[in-house]
Image: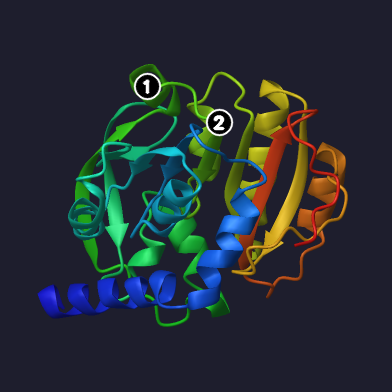
Amino acid sequence: MGRVATSIGLARSVAIYYGIPFRRRRLQRLYAQFIGPGSLCFDIGAHVGNRIRCWRALGARVVAVEPQSNAFRFLVRCYSRDADVSLVRCAVGRTSGMTTLRISELNPTVASVSADWINRVSTAPDFAGVTWNKTESVEQRTVDELITAYGRPDFLKIDVEGHEAEVLAGLSTAVAALSFEYIAATRDVAIACVDRLAELGDYRYNISHGESHRLALREWVDRTGIKKLIAGLPAQSGSGDIYAQLGGSFAGGSAKQ
């Protein structure tokens, strides 16, 4: 496919994440519950950086991590002159080293270092027609290494297409709040994330379905409650994000926005 397909794929991502006016306002309302002036935020899987824009508007400092070369170049063009944004080109996982990133040039949002996840979702209806037709060899680091370099984040966002549990395996200390993507077709990955977080601290959970950017639960639930909710998601319900916060970290009882 080459450069034309890559350009089309990137343009599609930019249109999706920057071209819908109400999305920015919803994102800011959502993240204002966790982020304020001076907060440090890690965006693991930054892609084209719409979270960077949102978090900077809230006054946060941002470490944005993206392994995909084309997306990273876009981030450099948009954010490299901002002293409160650190851009890091690497994957994140359980250990440091080198890994292979598998990319769909026409659908770059689903790039992943997890070959197992790609094999599993390739037959799911939501991924019909998606072909991972390109690879890149990329550096992989751990969240612990990023914390050593930049400090402990107040908020950690993980969106790495099936590799979320591996990212959390490389984190050895609790952070105040975080989110990770779930996909109904591979819900066991999300459940593994919850189990890992239970080893790190006493977290409470909420869920945001699809691209709603709204917390669905009025009351945050415990580990058992969120695992039951994840297990009960309809097979065709797509994806979304699980939010987690340490017990008592925020006054987040009423979550409807």
Q: Which residue is mark 2?
A: 154
Q: Position of residue 148 (x, y in %)?
A: 38, 17
Q: Which mark is residue 23?
A: none
Amino acid at circle 1 = Glu
Element under disc 2: loop
The kind of secondary structure element at disc 1 is: helix
Q: Distance of mark 2 from mark 1, alpha carbons? A: 16 Å
Q: Position of residue 49 (x, y in %)?
A: 36, 56
Q: Earlier in the sequence, mark 2 or mark 1?
A: 1
In percent of width and height, residue 173 lies at 57, 19
Identify the image quadrant of residue 195.
Answer: top right
10 Å crowding of disc 2: few (<14), some (14-19), many (20+): some
- The quadrant the C terminus occupies is bottom right
Quarter of the picture containing the N terminus is: bottom left
Q: Nearer the viewer, residue 217 or 106?
A: 217
**Residue 94 sits above or below residue 224 on the image:** above
Q: Residue at x 27, y 76 (%)?
A: 11
Residue 47 rendering spot, x and y as whole percentages = 35, 57
The number of numbered discs placed on residues in the rendered structure image is: 2
Q: Residue at x 60, y 50 (%)?
A: 31
User: In the drawing, does residue 75 fall left or right of residue 152?
Assistant: left
Q: Nearer the viewer, residue 176 or 100?
A: 176
Q: Which color scheme does this rendered protein use?
A: rainbow
Say which of marks 2 and 1 sits in front: 2
Give the residue at x 45% y 62%: 119
The residue type indicated by label 2 comes to Asp
Give the left or right position of residue 17, taking residue 104 as reference: right
- Residue that carries the numbered disc 1 in the rendered image: 145
Left or right placement of residue 174 versus residue 66 in this view: right
